[in-house]
Image: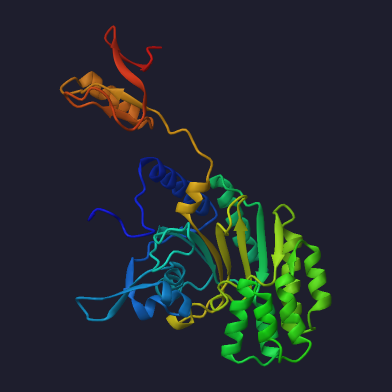
Amino acid sequence: MNWLLPEYIADALPYEATQIERLRRAVLDLFRVHGYELVMPPLLEYLDSLLTGSGSDLSLRTFKLVDQLSGRTLGVRADMTPQVARIDAHLLNRQGLTRLCYCDSVLHTLPASQAASREPIQLGAELYGYTGIEADLEAIRLMAAALDMAGTPASRIDIGHVGVFRALANAAGLGSGDEETILQLLQLKDIPGLRDCCAQLAEPYRTALLRLPELYGGRELLETAGRELPVLPEISSALETMKKLQAAMPELPLSFDLADLRGYHYHNGVVFAAYYPGFPSAIARGGRYDGVGKDFGRARPATGFSMDLREVARLAKTRQPAGAIQAPYAGTDCALASRIAALREQGEIVVELLPGELTCAGPWCDRSLVECQGQWIIQDLNGN
């Protein structure tokens, strides 16, 4: 059947589309009042620009095609974050802090999970130009506030730091191949595979790498990690940063996971992920990625987060759709036309039935506009 859509691609029907749009407006307004300016990068870019600084992971997720005008290879964006970094570093070129936000569709070659769409609506916020922990605090708090506003408050926000694994890999003298293999095993929490791969490593790094998958939990976890991991400056700095985050945000449900290394090739500091009850994967992710603008001419400190608005909209509490008002066709009736216009200016949905249209099939009408003693008044459709 020619009208079938590709796998993991779907239409958004009226209710879902309304829910997505409502959340988009609400969250972007939240970003706006926090000083984040909206940008709209293009859907397509030259591939070398689109993948700058993003690593091979993003390349595998990116659809590629040939530009019929230039003959060069184009990419359909799979992630808007590198595009926003390009805008900050190359187009805006501001000297101070820059706060930017965005919301639009991206396209993935493969779904991130069995339940995921290959066309997520990526909504996010990025803060450029500040190296201090205060920027990470702002990003995490803004992410939590956005999820609260969407009706999907985080039940848990995991904090990690890629510097812990990076310090262990460097100290153990891992080559790039071995580092990549151990990284994948840690992400899968494949303990037997990790044990085999680390068998020839020197102590204390072998034991520390084997311990990483078990280093997750509440506030006590950071003290445990400080006692059990090798005393390396990078690890001490990472643990101290996480302790400061914990102390500064007692109101949020923070936990810690030192083996959460998704985005390892992209992030270089604190990483965080928000979870919603009953949903198996994170509904929002973020972290620090300093230096991302280097290939665009300016290396800038950066931190931020993003979420799939389609996914959040599905999880958000169901809202009763706003009822509409069913009105007769105004034609040349100036009084009726004026009444309809006034109601629409007040934000009411008014469906003007065309000649021969007996009732409104959609949107859902719970009221009607009827004439009573020369006045157009609103009545419930049950006659009240």
Q: How is the image coloured?
A: rainbow
Residue 11 spot, x, y in % from top left? 34, 50
The answer to whether any part of residue 79 appears in the image is: yes
Taking the spot 65% from the left edge, 80% from the top edge, the residue there is 193
Percent coordinates x, y for residue 308 in the rendering: 48, 57
Q: Image height check: is 164 above or below 359?
A: below
Tell which of 265 and 298 is nearer to you. 265
Q: Position of residue 267 (x, y in %)?
A: 57, 75
Q: Quadrant of residue 380?
A: top left
Direction from residue 241 to residue 12 in the image, left or right: left
The residue sitting at the right extreme is 227
State how many labels appear: 0
Q: Residue at x 34, y 32 (%)?
A: 363
Q: Seen in the image, is 72 located left or right of residue 364?
A: left
Residue 350 lies, in percent from the top left, at 31, 28
Q: Quadrant of the C terminus?
A: top left
Q: Nearer the viewer, residue 356 or 39?
A: 356
Q: Is residue 187 above or below residue 37?
A: below
Please state, as top left, top right, bottom left or bottom right, where the N terminus lies in the image: bottom left
Residue 110: which quarter of the image?
A: bottom left
Please name the residue shown 45% across and 83% down the image: 295
